[in-house]
Image (cartoon, rainbow, N blue to C red):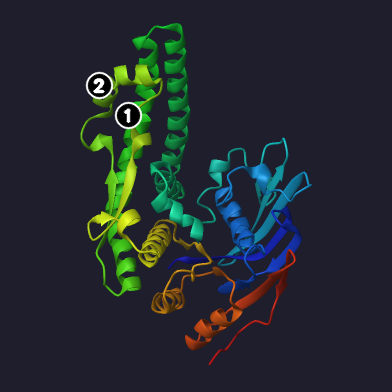
Amino acid sequence: MSNHLFVSKLSLINFKNYKQADLSLSPDINCFIGENGAGKTNVLDAIHYLSMCKSYLNPIDSQNILFDESFFVIQSIWNRENNEDSVYCGVKKGQKKVFKKNKVTYEKLADHIGQFPTVMISPYDRNLILEGSEVRRKWMDGIIAQFDRNFLNDLIKYGKVLAQRNALLKNMSSYGFFDRESISVWDEQLIACGKTIHEARKRIIDEFIPIFQKYYNWLSSDKEVVSLDYRSQLFDQSFEELLKQAERQDQRKQYTTVGTHRDDFIFTIKGHPIKKFGSQGQQKSYLIALKLAQYEWLLARLNRKPVLLLDDIFDKLDNERVERLMQMVSDQDFGQVLITDTDQDRIARIFERNEIEYKSFFIEDNTVVETAAKTNVI
């Protein structure tokens, strides 16, 4: 039996467009209604911050501080069974980010990852389809890191070793020599971390694909065949061989041209790249299916229901897919859900037709106002 994890209290000070906001949330469904640009997404992003120690939308912490202020603070109470945890995030310009759980400061932010899982579905997810491989790698690595601390440590170490190796290649080039012995010191560390990263990604994809396909089929009524493939140079050759073969190319380009930092995840529909051949609705369904699979996958491994953050998901989905998604969210008991939308009538219509209880908030002029809770809908 999994734990129902939820945020009961959320407090924002100088975060993005909010001077101050204090919210009491339902453990079930919470809807945030407001015009585009009102700051609905920022409430969801605050919860993502408390989960993953960073913004979903802007990785530069100081840029999430309210204009003309020098700091922001996000505080929350998370409930699970009979436990209650306070989580604090403080960012001050020019200082190190501070994270606390129950008033105890973390020495390493990595120790917080995975304790309070969230899954965000947002219009910005389109970057997973439209952008380069780094975006897709970061997404997949973010999932694995929430339950596998060793993977997260290897990932951090790999990044540092890669940066050192690249700096050495650049330095050697500027002095016009190549020192194989110096490079081999970094190669050993890169290979050790790279192999474990590759194995972890391979494992998750094998388990992840059937869950993803199940959700896509459910959303699309089994209308289209989709797939998800993991591409890596390490499938064809060992990391050692790859580095040996790439030696001259690395010297010429002054950076490391092979390794797990070049891996990619390929999204296809009917055997073709969804980026080129998928409609907007199909792309959106694909992304939602990916995220719902992420939710189920984390739930199974962490034994706690992640908080589901649904940002503006009704846009570009036809009515049938919206209805199916909302039925799924309520029928399968996803735990706490936060939803944003611009259309109050649409929210009321969908939920009342499906007899789903929810709590709603209206956002205007950088202020969040709780409206009447919708309960016992018949």
| Mark 1: few/some/many CA within 10 Å (<14, 14-19, 20+) | many
Q: Secondary structure at mark 2?
A: helix
Residue 245: image tag: 2
Q: Find out whether the residues at labels 1 and 2 contact each other: C-beta distance under 8 Å.
A: yes
Q: In the picture provided, is 98 more to the left or to the right than 341?
A: right
Which image quadrant for residue 187?
Answer: top left
Q: Kindly identify the residue that appears in the image at 35 percent across and 72 percent down.
A: 219
Q: Amino acid at mark 1?
A: Val
Instruction: Say whether disc 1 or disc 2 marks the residue closer to the N-terminus.
Output: 2
Question: Residue 86 at what x, y percent from top left?
Answer: 66, 56
Question: Residue 100 at what x, y percent from top left?
Answer: 66, 47
Extreme residue toward the left, this view: 236
Q: Secondary structure at mark 1?
A: loop
Observer-nearest of 206 and 266: 266
Q: Using the image, determine if residue 353 lies above or below residue 64.
A: below
**Separation of marks 1 and 2 at Cα, in angstroms:** 9 Å
Q: Kindly identify the residue that appears in the image at 55 percent across and 67 percent down.
A: 81
Residue 177 shows up from this direction: yes
| Residue with the mark numbered 1 | 258
Q: In the picture provided, is 97 more to the left or to the right than 158?
A: right
Q: Using the image, determine if residue 260 lies above or below residue 250.
A: below
Q: Amino acid at mark 2?
A: Gln
Q: Using the image, determine if residue 40 lies above or below residue 49.
A: below
